[in-house]
């Protein structure tokens, strides 16, 4: 069962506990500075677009965490059940130990100085615009890495076994990247990826974005949010550009 908190519902749950039957909890864009006690059986938690500077202890069975666009300076201990972490646009300087089942890590637009030891199942890392100087050894499971706009001085010599795509801006000279990576690089030229043109798809996505801005009450289902996100970053010739119109937070944080 899912629960999307509104300002009206928020007042109700300030007086009574959220039922443990709730598995998906969405409380975005409510200017929260603290969170209510979390249901013990929660699987998906989205607290993006608030003013949180810390998170409470996370439930042991949590699988997806979205906390983009807050004021977080650190994350709590992360349960091993977590498969996705989205903590973009915060003030994080470091990450805690990453869960062994983690598959997706989004942490762009922070102040992170280094990446912790990466779990063996990790498939996607998006960490642009941080202060990372060293990219650690990458697990063979990794398929996509986006790490531009970091002061990187060292990059691993080994390409992961299942790797497909390294994303970076074409107008930046990344001389630190070993030559073994050259066949995996996707250059982004502002409006489209090099040798890929999916303008009809992009016009559709941009139209959705403009509609959301125009109609303030328009809300999208979680599946559409994730679908847009996958289109923006899927590697290979079926991939699409990252939108220049908006950061990730405006899509995932509804």
Image (cartoon, helix red, strand yellow):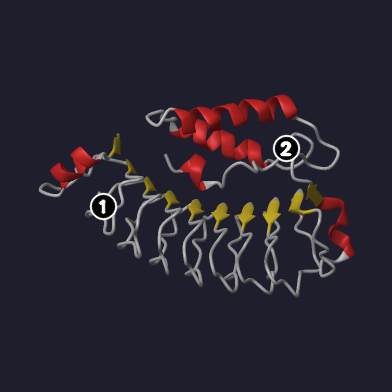
Whether residue 226 is visible to the viewer of this picture, yes or no, is yes
Residue 104: x, y in percent?
56, 51
Q: In this view, does 252 lie to the left or right of 17?
A: right
User: What residue is shown with label 1?
Assistant: 38
Foreground pick, 109 / 154: 109
Q: Nearer the viewer, mark 2 or mark 1?
A: 2
Towards the viewer: 135 or 141: 135
- Of 145 and 14, which appears nearest the observer? 14
Q: In which quarter of the image is the C terminus?
A: top left
Residue 170, above or below 129: above
Residue found farthest to the right: 179
Tell me: residue 115, above or below residue 34.
below
The N terminus lies in quadrant: top left
Residue found at x 63% / y 25%: 204
The answer to whether residue 38 is above or below residue 8 is: below
- The Cα atoms of the two marked residues, 2 and 1, are separated by 37 Å
Secondary structure, mark 2, is loop
Please tell me the numbered disc located at residue 163: none
Label 2 CA crowd tier, 10 Å (few <14, some 14–19, many 20+):
some
Task: Name the residue carrying label 2.
Answer: 239
Would you identify the image quadrant in which residue 7 lies?
A: top left
Q: Is residue 163 visible?
A: no
> 10 Å neighbourhood of mark 1: few (<14), some, or many (≥20)?
some
Residue beneath the point at 64% across and 41% down: 243
- Percent of width and height locating residue 3: 28, 37
């Amino acid at each position: 069962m899912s629960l999307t908190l509104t300002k009206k519902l928020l007042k109700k749950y300030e007086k009574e506990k959220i039922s443990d039957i709730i598995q998906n909890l969405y409380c975005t864009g409510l200017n929260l500075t603290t969170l209510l006690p979390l249901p013990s059986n929660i699987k998906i938690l989205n607290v993006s677009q608030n003013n949180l500077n810390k998170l409470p202890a996370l439930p042991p069975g949590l699988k997806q965490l979205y906390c983009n666009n807050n004021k977080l300076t650190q994350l709590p201990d992360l349960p091993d059940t977590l498969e996705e972490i989205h903590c973009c646009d915060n003030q994080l300087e470091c990450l805690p130990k990453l869960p062994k089942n983690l598959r997706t890590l989004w942490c762009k637009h922070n102040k992170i100085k280094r990446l912790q030891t990466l779990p063996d199942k990790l498939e996607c890392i998006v960490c642009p615009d941080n202060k990372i100087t060293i990219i650690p050894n990458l697990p063979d499971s990794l398929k996509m890495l986006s790490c531009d706009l970091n002061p990187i001085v060292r990059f691993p010599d080994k390409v992961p076994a299942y790797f497909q795509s390294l994303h970076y801006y074409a107008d930046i000279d990344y001389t630190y990247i070993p030559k073994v990576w050259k066949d995996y690089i996707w250059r982004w030229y502002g409006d489209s990826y090099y040798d890929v043109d999916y303008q009809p798809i992009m016009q559709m996505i941009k139209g959705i974005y403009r509609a959301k801005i125009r109609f303030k009450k328009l809300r999208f289902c979680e599946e559409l949010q994730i679908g847009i996100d996958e289109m923006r970053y899927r590697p290979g010739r079926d991939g699409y550009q990252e939108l220049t119109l908006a950061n990730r937070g405006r899509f995932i944080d509804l």
